[in-house]
């Protein structure tokens, strides 16, 4: 189900693009060395992408992560000065010191940590010994990382956005005022059970978010989130928004080279199956299946619209790397822009899995990100991209879905699965030895990406994979491992259904 | 109660501990010119505001960071081969043989005398804001705890849950966790002294003060 959304470029853009291309043709990837400033699964994918491109790399790790697969991969596959132990992944000085010592020319932040930190990206690009930040330029991260700015930009282009506070709130009185008005607004709209979302402005990934149904409860929830935000993010700012409960979470994968003039999209994803803490658990590409399922709205039209809106914003800001536009789509089929993630995402692999460029399968969006990040031109246009079949990703996590998805901590003793041509397993958990889950980070164990020619096939293969998965372990008290495998099984049947 | 004399004898048999001084982060090492066998001092001054003897300098991103002795002692190992080298975080630079002080002995013995409330999981721990405020305002001894009271916040993988104290009622006599530091499962978090045992505990302290001679 190909989608031809590319609009003809005007002449000015075309000449700028040509100039950029002739300069970029000089870029030799093998002159570069990338600092992989992340851990676990994403660090491994970045290292593998670098190897594929012939780019050298240097990895880092902390004491807690000594047994992680990314450390082993760096030891086995890295060249000289390819692995350093640092005090923290959060310490920019550590990353810069290692980059200099190892002779790196670029930094890949992965996701999380410094991925959306414009100050870090700016420092990397402006320090005496300059490095390339593999991500959008710092100005774009600053512009789109700021939610109010994104909202303003979206509105200026006629892109619909979610109602609510448009900046972090630091004052309790003001917070209460906004909450009151959001409650009243929903009552006027005839919403049965009005709901306000309180979230840490500096948070992300579903952390530091609570829902309030009762206006009298608002103050205590606000204070709790504010204190939490202060402890975890050193910023008391809190956002207050209307919470739309009945929606699907969609996103659009954008890719654009350093010219910033020719963004393309790699289709849509549906990430509606989430934990109660609003963290994604199953992601599917494409975002809806109008040919196979019944929707109460024109689903094909919604996909076209959100792709067009996203591309329009990318063009407007001169977006110059990979990024994701996140959308919520209501039951009536109304899309609202939620935010822009100016980084590679965990689930980029499902889009890559179903994509073909110039008729060839096996797209690697992280390799594309590294390549264009280092300055190479994209080398293809929207017309060269097609998709085939359905991709689905399971996030396999040590957690207890029956108990509010509480993380489970302990030792993984057995982790085995059946290799299949339609299965890609991404994991930093060793298959051949026991692995102690570090408590410093989320207990994500693996990503399983499954491909099928249609929805029925991908679901059947998904269940086949989960049924054959062996995942066992024990914690300090001798209790058996808890995982979300049953949750994934139970939810496979409803993917892409509204 | 515990047998203080036996404990003291046990400690006297091996009255020192080895402290490994490791780099807190990456950087370029230059040593401060000490050699094996040299005596060093820990932090000095009324508020321990003067840092201990400098062992080395660790330079990173043009910031030189002095690496100082955390305690008084004698240098037993010095990794001088690292001079001028870029090192990873956690690289040992020196080993210090440190004679136990009266306070450390007292702390060790108190850990056996007090009721210890232990970490149920490997996690970071914080006092609840109310308790934290009280401790800041005066000190830990002013906080009375009772069974079932919401005392701590346990933070793991960025998720926070309240932790209720279990054990005898009493006052917090010792705090064993540090802000933002991971505590292993079973590590003591606080030492609680029941009100009626306060005199006995004071007695323990008195005995250590009189019976422990600090060695130079």
Image (cartoon, rainbow, N blue to C red):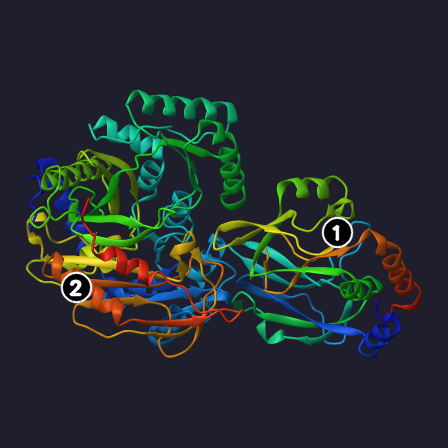
A162 shown above or below A455: above
Picture quadrant of residue B52: bottom right
Foreground pick, A170 / A183: A183
A78 shown above or below A145: below
A162 shown above or below A110: above
A77 shown above or below A391: below
**Residue at the image point whose x is 71% and y is 49% from the top:** B146
**Residue at the image point whose x is 43% and y is 64% from the top:** A60
Asked if the residue under mark 2 is in contact with the one under mark 1, i.e. CB atoms within 8 Å, the reply is: no
Q: Position of residue B28 (x, y in %)?
A: 55, 64
Foreground pick, A83 / B6: B6
**Residue at the image point whose x is 23% and y is 57% from the top:** A492
Circle 2 residue: A460
Q: Position of residue B35 (x, y in %)?
A: 72, 74
Picture quadrant of residue B214: bottom right
Specify few, some or many for label 1: CA neighbours under 10 Å numbering under 14, 14-19, or 20 or more: some
Specify few, some or many for label 2: CA neighbours under 10 Å numbering under 14, 14-19, or 20 or more: few
Is residue A238 rendered to the left or right of residue A319?
A: right
Which element is circle 2 on? helix
Foreground pick, B158 / A307: B158
On the question of residue B199 being in view, the answer is: yes
Q: Position of residue A115 (x, y in %)?
A: 36, 50
Q: Chain of mark 1?
A: B
Foreground pick, A285 / A398: A398
Circle 1 residue: B169
């Amino acid at each position: 189900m190909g989608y031809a959304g590319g609009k003809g470029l005007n002449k000015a853009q075309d000449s700028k693009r040509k100039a950029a291309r002739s300069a970029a043709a000089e870029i030799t990837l093998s002159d570069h060395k990338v600092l992989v400033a992340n851990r676990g699964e994403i660090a491994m994918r970045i290292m593998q992408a670098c190897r594929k491109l012939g780019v050298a790399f240097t990895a880092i790790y902390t004491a807690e992560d000594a047994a992680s697969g990314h450390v082993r991969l760096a030891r086995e596959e890295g060249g000289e000065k390819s692995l350093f132990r640092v005090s923290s992944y959060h310490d920019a000085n550590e990353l810069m010191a290692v980059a200099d010592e190892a002779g790196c020319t670029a930094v890949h932040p992965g996701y999380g940590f410094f991925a959306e930190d414009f100050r870090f990206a700016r420092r990397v690009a402006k320090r005496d010994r300059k490095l390339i930040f593999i991500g959008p330029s710092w100005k774009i991260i600053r512009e789109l990382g700021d939610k109010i700015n994104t909202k303003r930009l979206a509105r200026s282009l006629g892109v619909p956005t979610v109602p609510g506070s448009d900046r972090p709130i630091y004052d309790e009185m003001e917070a209460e005022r906004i909450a009151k008005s959001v409650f009243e607004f929903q009552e006027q709209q005839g919403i049965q059970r009005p709901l306000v979302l309180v979230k840490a402005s500096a948070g992300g990934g579903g952390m530091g978010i609570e829902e309030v149904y009762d206006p009298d409860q608002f103050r205590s929830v606000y204070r709790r989130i504010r204190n939490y935000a202060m402890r975890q993010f050193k910023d008391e700012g809190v956002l207050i928004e209307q919470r739309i409960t009945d929606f699907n979470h969609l996103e659009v994968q954008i890719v654009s080279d350093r010219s910033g003039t020719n963004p393309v999209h790699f289709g849509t994803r549906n990430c509606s199956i989430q934990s109660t803490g609003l963290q994604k658990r199953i992601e599917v590409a494409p975002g809806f299946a109008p040919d196979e399922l019944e929707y109460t709205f024109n689903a094909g039209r919604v996909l076209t619209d959100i792709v067009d809106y996203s591309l329009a914003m990318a063009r407007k800001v001169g977006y110059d790397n990979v990024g994701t536009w996140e959308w919520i789509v209501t039951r009536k089929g109304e899309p609202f822009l939620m935010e822009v993630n100016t980084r590679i995402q965990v689930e980029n692999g499902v889009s890559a899995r179903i994509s073909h460029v110039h008729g060839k399968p096996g797209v690697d969006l992280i390799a594309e990100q590294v390549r264009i990040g280092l300055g190479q031109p994209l080398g293809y246009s929207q017309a060269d991209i097609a998709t085939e079949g359905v991709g689905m990703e399971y996030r396999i996590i040590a957690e207890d879905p029956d108990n509010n998805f509480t993380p489970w901590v302990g030792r993984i003793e057995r982790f085995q699965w059946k290799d299949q041509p339609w299965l890609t397993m991404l994991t930093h958990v060793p298959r051949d030895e026991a692995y102690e889950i570090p408590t410093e980070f989320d207990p994500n164990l693996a990503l399983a990406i499954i491909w099928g020619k249609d929805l029925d096939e991908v679901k059947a293969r998904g269940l086949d994979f989960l049924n054959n998965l062996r995942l066992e372990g024990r914690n300090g008290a001798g209790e058996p491992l808890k995982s979300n495998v049953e949750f994934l099984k139970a939810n496979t049947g409803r993917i892409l259904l509204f | 109660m515990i047998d203080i004399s036996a404990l003291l004898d046990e400690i006297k048999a091996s009255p020192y501990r080895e402290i490994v001084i490791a780099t807190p982060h990456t950087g370029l090492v230059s040593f401060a010119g000490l050699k094996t066998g040299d005596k060093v001092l820990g932090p000095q001054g009324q508020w321990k505001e003067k840092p201990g003897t400098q062992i080395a300098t660790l330079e990173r991103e043009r910031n030189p960071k002095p690496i100082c002795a955390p305690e008084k002692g004698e240098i037993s190992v010095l990794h001088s081969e690292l001079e001028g080298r870029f090192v990873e975080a956690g690289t040992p630079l020196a080993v210090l043989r440190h004679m136990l002080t009266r306070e450390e002995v007292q702390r060790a013995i108190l850990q056996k005398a007090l009721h210890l409330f232990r970490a149920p999981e490997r996690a970071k721990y914080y006092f609840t804001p109310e308790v934290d405020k009280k401790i800041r305002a005066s000190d830990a001894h002013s906080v009375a705890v009772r069974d079932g009271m919401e005392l701590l916040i346990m933070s793991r993988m960025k998720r926070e849950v309240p932790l209720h104290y279990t054990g005898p009622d009493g006052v917090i006599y010792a705090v064993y966790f540090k802000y933002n530091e991971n505590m292993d499962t079973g590590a003591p978090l606080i030492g609680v002294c029941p009100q009626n045992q306060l005199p006995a505990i004071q007695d323990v302290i008195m005995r250590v003060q009189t019976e422990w001679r600090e060695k130079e």
